[in-house]
Image (spheres, rainbow, N blue to C red):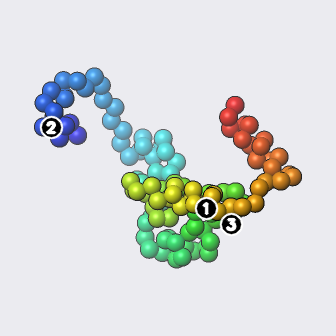
């Protein structure tokens, strides 16, 4: 890990003040989405992608649960450095045109207050 920066910037190694090495077990323990060393939160096999998901509607950024948006590596099109799951979730959020009212508004407000305490 240090050889490439050292080659481009001689003296890099002398600036390193500490190291922390975490193996697969430690990474999985710290990240519940990192199941069985799969960075995408599970399989990226075709049968789990978009329209081929086992339950219709769960391949979208907005599954059939009201106000739930999926933006993680576990969401379509999976993990990577592209940001597509987040972009899909943002588009789904912006496409919503119905405000929360009544009991639903109260439940969300209560949950938000609990999160930000």
Q: CA distance from mark 3 to mark 2?
A: 50 Å
User: Do the residues under discs 3 and 1 have CB atoms within 8 angstroms?
Assistant: no
- Tell me what residue is drawn at x 50 percent, y 51 percent: 33
Residue 101 tag number: none
**Residue 92, image x and y in percent?**
61, 61
Q: For marks 3 and 1, give the one nearer the viewer.
A: 1
| Sequence-first tag of 1 and 2 | 2
Q: Quadrant of residue 61?
A: bottom right
Which residue is label 1 attached to?
Answer: 92
Q: CA distance from mark 1 to mark 2?
A: 42 Å
Which residue is label 2 attached to?
Answer: 8
Q: Quadrant of the N terminus?
A: top left
In the rendered image, the vertical position of residue 106 relative to residue 43, given as above or below = above
In the rendered image, the vertical position of residue 40 relative to residue 17, given as above or below = below
Secondary structure at numbered mark 3? loop
Residue 57 visible in this rendered orientation of the protein: yes
Neighbourhood count class around disc 1 (C-alpha, 10 Å): few under 14, some 14–19, many 20 upward: some
Q: For marks 3 and 2, give the one nearer the viewer.
A: 2
């Amino acid at each position: 890990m240090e050889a490439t920066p050292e080659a481009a910037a001689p003296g890099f190694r002398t600036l390193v003040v500490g190291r922390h090495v975490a193996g697969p077990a430690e990474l999985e323990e710290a990240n519940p989405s990192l199941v069985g060393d799969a960075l995408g939160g599970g399989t990226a096999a075709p049968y789990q992608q978009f329209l081929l998901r086992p339950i219709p509607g769960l391949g979208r950024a907005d599954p059939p649960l009201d106000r739930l948006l999926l933006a993680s590596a576990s969401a379509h099109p999976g993990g990577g450095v592209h940001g597509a799951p987040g972009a899909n979730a943002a588009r789904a959020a912006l496409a919503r045109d119905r405000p929360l009212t009544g009991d639903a508004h109260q439940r969300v407000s209560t949950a938000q207050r609990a999160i930000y305490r």
